Amino acid sequence: MSEKYVHPSGKGSLFINTYKKEGDKQPYLKGTGTTLDGKQMDIAGWKNQAPDGGTKISLEFSEPYVKDAEKSTSSDKSKNVVLDL
């Protein structure tokens, strides 16, 4: 499995969402970025009409998506911790 690219601090990339179908609510653009303090973020962008009639892109930043299999693997690891007191 290849490692995911990590952007430098304050940088990101957006790509056209090839899975979007006409009329659905999926974002027009999807990508990732890194905040100025180094936190990884997922970025989504929707193409909308601006009040002046032009085109605007509305952005949404969220925590990185984690697949269910990865969630259960990481939570399984925490269940196996043994503390000797």
Image (cartoon, rainbow, N blue to C red):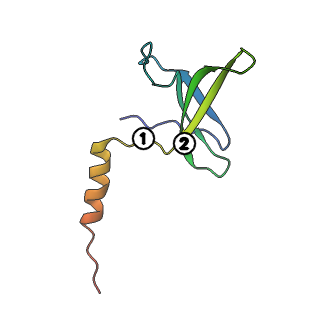
Q: Which of the numbered marks, if any, corresponds to residue 48?
A: none
Which residue is at the far right? 52
Residue 59: x and y in percent read 60, 32
* The N terminus lies in quadrant: top left
Helix or strand or loop: what does disc 1 sit on?
loop
How packed mark 2 is, by other alpha carbons closer than 10 Å (few <14, some 14-19, many 20 or more), is some
* The C terminus lies in quadrant: bottom left
Tell me if 52 is positioned left or right of 49 in this view: right
Helix or strand or loop: what does disc 2 sit on?
strand
Could you tell me the amino acid type at mark 1? Tyr
Of 51 and 63, the residue lying toward us: 51
Tell me if 75 is positioned left or right of 13 in this view: left
Residue at numbered disc 2: 41
Residue 68: x and y in percent read 29, 43
Using the numbered discs, state the Cα–Cα distance from disc 2 to disc 1 in whole angstroms: 9 Å
Tell me if 40 is positioned left or right of 78 in this view: right
The residue sitting at 32% across, 54% down in the picture is: 74
The residue sitting at 47% across, 37% down in the picture is: 4
Q: Earlier in the sequence, mark 2 or mark 1?
A: 2
State which quadrant residue 41 falls in: top right
Residue 70: x and y in percent read 31, 46
Answer above or below: position of 39 versus 1: below
Answer above or below: position of 70 versus 76: above
Residue 45: x and y in percent read 57, 27
Of 85 and 2, the residue lying toward us: 85
The residue sitting at 72% across, 21% down in the picture is: 51
Q: Which of the numbered marks, if any, corresponds to residue 65?
A: 1
The residue sitting at 57% across, 36% down in the picture is: 60
Could you tell me the amino acid type at mark 2? Met
State which quadrant residue 53 falls in: top right
How packed mark 1 is, by other alpha carbons closer than 10 Å (few <14, some 14-19, many 20 or more), is few
